[in-house]
Image (tube, helix red, strand yellow):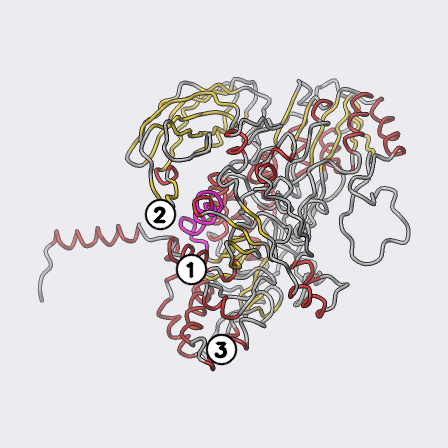
Amino acid sequence: MKRIPLLTLLACLLVAVACKQKAAPQDRLLANEAKINDIIAQMTLEEKVNMLHSKTNMSSAGVERLGIADINYADGPFGIREEGVPNGFQSAGWTLDSATYFPTGSALAATWSEDLAYKYGTAMGKEARIRGKDVILGPAVNIQRLPVGGRTYEYLSEDPILSAALSLYYTKGVQDQGTAVCIKHFAVNNQETNRGSVNVKIDERTLREIYLKPFERAVVEGGAMSVMPAYNRVNGDYCSENEHLLNEILRGDWGFKGMTVSDWGGTHSTMGAMLHGLNVQMTGSNYLGPAVIDSIKTGALTEAQVDEKVRQILRLRFAIEAVPADKANQIITSQPESQKTALAVAEKSIVLLKNNNILPIKANVKKIAVIGQNAVLKTQSGGVGAGVKALYEVSPLQGIQARAGKNIEVNYAPGYKNFPGRRWGPAPAEPDPLVATAIDEPADPALMAEAMELAKNADLVIFFGGTNKSIETEGSDRNDIKLPCGQEELVQALYETNPNLVTVLISGGPTDLQLLEPVSPAIVQGWWNGMEGGTALAEVLFGDIAPSGKLPFTFPMKLEDSPAYAMGNFPNDTREMDLFTAMYRPDMTPAERQALNAQRPIPVSDYTERFYVGYRWFDTKNITPMYAFGHGLSYVDFSYGDMEAKATGKGVKVTFTLKNEGDMPADEVVQLYVTRVGSSVEWPEKELKAFSRVSLNAGESRKVTLEIPLNDLRYWNEAKNGWDLEHGKLQLLLGSASDDIRQSAEVSI
């Protein structure tokens, strides 16, 4: 037997360890290749094809005789949706499926916290396991391009670095619990208007640098096991059969090894889906069912192509342990640990937009008037798609009442009518005096009079305005960002009656505050903040904790200032019935739905604003917003010490000392932006490249380090069709918001 020298053996071991350490997160999906080969060899063609489409509305089939369990999907992404009937979203009437309602995506993004994103994902993953679910249909990470976007509340940010960081840690949190994510909606699904057919025309640099960045980090660094192609087209091809997106970028450039699942009704052809990257059709089997078998018979497809689809599905199936039916749903879905996470996220998400020394609520306040229906309306129900049957939900009014206790009188008046959004079917027999018939209905005189009476006798007025989940909803975008139902008229009257006024906005996206801001001494963005949202809001208002949320998107002064509107890229004249909602409308027959889909136009959405999205546009064009990206006040001041910066072979490293100058614990989100100096390449005025949430006790100082990886300083060179690094000077801008820069330095790379 030949002896191996000790040094050689040691070197081999070190190489093996190094290789193991460098294993890509996607490699987790390759652990069962031999087993998968054996199983595929035993399957009939019919069994294979049966795995390529839905079994029920929220599952796709396994192969029972070979011990392959079905794949069960859970709608998300901010709570495990209640159990539905097999072929629809109607409630199955269960009692144990009440889940934790977490703050929605824009609220999570306002925390600017990777740690909280991980805990959020962890809690979601655990509750999915309790329900016997294998895959969460989330996170939803599309860039917020439009202030009017119907799903802004579900998504994260207008910035790719912030969105990518939160996407990554959400993904890790979910998958560390043995549940897979299905990151969505891939890609460039930035409008609900005509989403079922719109063709997005976008250049490759903008696509790569802005819109794909959150997906890339979740896949490459987070090991996301499944991806959901979006409804729309990108540069001519539907996302569910887009060779460039699914095969060249996702599987090619990023090394994705898992499965793709179409959005519900988002599959459009057999050959397109089979040849260009889709694994599972949801829902139905009209494309990836018998038609696949027929195509193999004619020679248009091969069984080997089906085998590869099945292989990718089985990789996820064997990476995620199936929960036996007799082990699932044995306890209530919502668990105390998850509820604590929901509270923690809500506490850190609340943004103090403005404060003229009226908050926190002073000790001499003994009578509070709470005005506005948004103080009592529940927000757990989804805007068509996403929604949760929450175990409970603390409303803002309930939170204030509980915190006020017996020594403070809290009175409530609805103040304005609530707009219920679109309705299908007959109108109610009797009109509801608190329900508006139009979104722009003027303020109701009787409701205003009641509110004025409470306000004039109060020490403090807290007005709750904003939108609701019928206004911001899947399937449609808002026509504008104005406050509905006479809210502006009401708040102006309240201020004239009692100037001790706090305005709290309950919404998922930005609103037009031109008329509200001058008559609001304090403004708070309260979001759709989950089942503990009212508790968290009361803690901030009363000063139990300092507000620390930062805006994840720009609040424009007016809608026309935002890039897509300024460039004339949105809206266009075509407005069609939404593809998804048409699938489930009770007043439409299957034949009517089929005819509608066959007649859909192909509207175009031009992204000629390119990478000037959000604050990049406002800063570059020198347009002043109402509130800038990253903005958020506190009850304390933070001082930023001198910044030291140096370029390394791995990127840029910045250190400075942050101090809490106040008399209470507080968090600051420090933000590092980059401006290119003397560049020959086109760049926005500045771009966020690093951030960190820092918790400090009263008077505490701490050295903070921020690092920018070299990869995040690259740009997509379209001439070379690849990533490139421009060497030269960088101006580093350190601050508390995109418009609040405290320190700067220059480095060369």
> Residue 745 occupies which quadrant of the picture?
top left
Instruction: In the rendered view, tell whether residue 718 sits above or below residue 461.
Output: below
Which corner quadrant of the image does residue 558 belong to? top right
The residue tagged with tag 1: helix, strand or loop? helix
Q: Residues within 10 Å of mark 3 (few under 14, many from 20)?
A: some
Does the image show residue 352? yes
**Within-10-Å neighbours for mark 2: few <14, some 14–19, many 20+:** few
Q: CA distance from mark 2 to mark 3?
A: 36 Å
Residue type at tag 3: Ser
| Residue type, label 1 | Asn
Q: Nearer the viewer, residue 572 or 510?
A: 572
Judge whether residue 215 is colored magenta. Answer: yes
The quadrant the N terminus occupies is bottom left
Q: Of marks 1 and 3, which one's residue comes earlier in the chain?
A: 1
**What secondary structure do most residues of the magenta stretch adopt?**
helix
Callouts 2 and 3 close, C-beta under 8 Å = no
Secondary structure under badge 2? strand
Mark 2 and mark 3 lie on one chain; the one further toward the N terminus is: 3
**CA–CA distance between discs 1 and 3?**
21 Å
The residue at which mark 3 appears reads as 295
> Can you tell which mark lies on residue 722?
2
The residue that label 1 is drawn on is: 247
Task: Please provide percent x and percent y for residue 598.
Answer: 64, 66
Q: CA distance from mark 1 to mark 2?
A: 16 Å
Q: Position of residue 333 (x, y in %)?
A: 62, 54
Q: Which residues are magenta?
A: 207-224
Taking the spot 68% from the left edge, 61% from the top edge, the residue there is 89
454 lies above or below 325: above
Q: In the structure shown, which secondary structural element does the residue marked by tag 3 occupy? A: helix
Query: Horizontal and vertical percent for residue 180?
Result: 49, 57
The x and y percentages for residue 39 are 41, 75
Q: Nearer the viewer, residue 562 or 462?
A: 562
